[in-house]
Image (tube, helix red, strand yellow):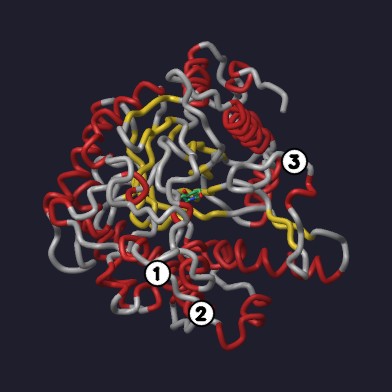
Amino acid sequence: MTRIDPLQLHQRFPRDFIWGVATSAFQIEGAATADGKGPSIWDTFCRQPGAIADGSNGDIACDHYHRWPADLDLIKALGVDAYRFSVSWPRVQPTGEGAWNEPGLAFYERLVDGLLARGIKPYLTLNHWDLPQALQDRGGWANRDTVHRFVDYACGMAARLGDRVAAITTHNEPWVVAVLGHETGIFAPGIKRRATAMQAAHHLLLSHGLALQALRAQGCSSRLGIVLNLSPIGPATSRPEDVAAARLEDGRSVRWYMDPLFKGAYPADVLEHLGADAPHIEADDLRHIATPMDFLGVNYYTRSVVSASGTWDVKTSGRALTDMGWEVYPEGLTELLLRLHHDYRVPPLYVKENGAAFKDQLVNGSVHDAERTDYIAHHIAAVADALAQGVPMAGYMVWSLLDNFEWASGYEKRFGIVHVDYSTQQRTPKDSALWYRDFLRARAAAPAAPDPVLAGA
Ligand code: IFM
């Protein structure tokens, strides 16, 4: 890939564009049973033989629960504006309802205050997948009662931190929770039943809308939204069966979430395809789901190419692949952002996750991860391309600050711009972190891009 000049890249963004790094609770915190934390579905899932590639779990992870001050210093040293983190629901409310766990709340209060003291905006996510196991024991996201438990949890967190966090995301990637957690079963809670997955998806969306209403009713001043994992989805060939398969996949993974959130209806073609597996929907549910948002977050890693036979081989694309086997395809991000802008009346858009796993080598205190640096630089350029075409882009966050627990892949896949030696917990900024820092420093020298809205006036 061609090298991108950080200064020129910066000139393509407005001054108030938010730059950040992202993590999630289960992937970095560890301290699985510390200070009254209850078990989550991922604590349970990791104990199932064969569930995690390297047989690992989140018991220690990056030990961020104990090392957060040094980690916040690292974030500060990068020069970012914002840090996106998630709250472990069972750490603050061990059984998902009723009693709150004061030490858990105090941890997030220290974290938020520590960010503010360092001049970094906290971006809080309520659900990055670690549902309290006690709620799963009663059906989890497939049980409509979990919707109300989530709203209570959201209100409790906002009452405690809503005056200090810049933004609150309800759910991260509901497609993953629904489909990987309840249909293919490769993620917690490991259920393999499509009807359960679609009911879970509906309840996730409903809980999002009801939480937004409740948070606004209690005067929460944070900006509120959701984060979806989305990709442009195209057919492997122009054969009608491949085109139809790609359209259905787009319906299941993009329109199933975007349409109810922004148009107040599930896509008719997907409902018809699901038949008896379609979710039970009550009166007013769709009106609640379509509650207006202050922002939409998008997580982008790669495009999706679909064939009716399911046989498209990513290696035939000729593009570089990451260690996850995902094709490096930055122009797909521009394509996706333009589509969201044109097909939906989207509020300000943030890329809330973007990054790549590669096989890093720590040699003499350095990690020369040129592939990751290129990946990030080209995806930032793809965001600039969308911005230049009128998409209301407001921010970009790298996934991830640290190497961490990559779910079913365990610790084998490294997404961090900071290397973690799991035996010593030593952190080492990789070359990509140094590039990101230098890119952010270039802001001081770069003339600001004209505001795209004002420029068009
Ligand atoms: O690590 C995950 C993250 O938790 C959610 N989005 C995708 C990342 C990479 O797989």
Marks 3/2: CA–CA distance: 34 Å
Relative to 454, residue 46 above or below: below
The local secondary structure at tag 2 comes to: loop
Residue 403 position within the rendered picture, expressed as x and y whole percent measured from the top left: 43, 38
Q: Quadrant of the C terminus?
A: top right
The local secondary structure at tag 3 comes to: loop
Provide the residue designation for mark 2: 193
Seen in the image, is 394 located left or right of residue 41?
right
Residue at the far right in the pictured view: 239
Seen in the image, is 261 located left or right of residue 149?
right
Q: Amino acid at mark 2?
A: Arg
Residue at left offset 74%, top offset 41%: 319
Relative to 235, residue 456 above or below: above
Seen in the image, is 245 located left or right of residue 264?
right
Provide the residue designation for mark 1: 189
Residue at left offset 50%, top offset 61%: 176
Q: Quadrant of the N terminus?
A: top right
Q: Earlier in the sequence, mark 1 or mark 3?
A: 1
Residue 71 position within the rendered picture, expressed as x and y whole percent measured from the top left: 30, 31
Q: Amino acid at mark 3?
A: Arg
Q: Nearer the viewer, residue 119 or 325?
A: 325
CB atoms of marks 1 and 3 within 8 Å: no
Residue at the far top in the pictured view: 445
